[in-house]
Amino acid sequence: MNCAVCRTPMMVLEYQDIEVDHCPECKGIWLDAGELRLLLGDGGAAREFLTGGQGINEGEQPRHCPVCRGTMRKETTRGPEPVTYDVCLRGDGLWFDQGELAAIIQHGSSSPGGDAVSNWLRDMFTSVEGN
């Protein structure tokens, strides 16, 4: 799979049955839809954290899904420091530009449901960096 931003071939990082695609060039992250379900489980609070923001778009260029190549829509997390990321309209997955997952890890635990997402991401990236 190629990066949604720079078209560089992505690297696959594996953690607890979830494969995360990571761009070594621009540091973007792709989560397939099935991986997101594994991350969130049936947790409505975690899902609401990821999609409950006010739709902030700071002039970012639209991204194209690395799976279907369709234009993705911007979503924003809840919380005191919302994070804007990209969602495939066809449901293939989520794209996070460099720093967006780090911001969710840092600020997510201060919002209802955000702690589950933040803890999982923190565990994953700490484990991957430690290998």
Image: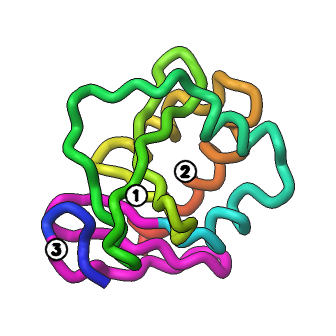
Mark number displayed over residue 122: 2
Q: Which residue is mark 1?
A: 95
Q: Secondary structure at mark 1?
A: strand
Q: Amino acid at mark 3?
A: Arg
Judge by depth and name the residue closer to the eye, 77 or 69: 69
Q: Residue at x 16, y 76 (%)?
A: 8
State the count of labels: 3
Kindly check if marks 2 and 1 are in contact, taking CB atoms under 8 A apart as contact: no
Spot the residue most to the top.
80
95 left or right of 108?
left
The range drawn in magenta is 7-30
Q: Secondary structure at mark 3?
A: loop
Q: Residue at x 73, y 42 (%)?
A: 46
Tell me: residue 102, above or below residue 28.
above
- Residue toward you, 42 or 92: 92
What residue lies at 61% left-to-right and 40% top-to-bottom? 50
Task: Give, as a three-letter code, the residue at label 2.
Answer: Arg
- How would you rate the neighbour count of disc 3 (Cα within 10 Å): few for under 14, some for 14-19, many for 20 or more? few
Mark pair 3, 1: CA separation? 13 Å
Q: Look at label 1 and name its amino acid.
A: Trp
Numbered mark located on residue 7 in the image: 3
Where residue 5 sits: x, y (%)?
Answer: 20, 61
Q: CA distance from mark 2 to mark 3?
A: 26 Å
Check residue 18 for magenta coloring. yes
> What percent of the width, then of the height, locates residue 102?
41, 42
C-beta proximity under 8 Å, tags 3 and 1: no
Find numbered disc 2 in the image and state the secondary structure of the residue it sits on. helix
Q: Quadrant of residue 48?
A: top right
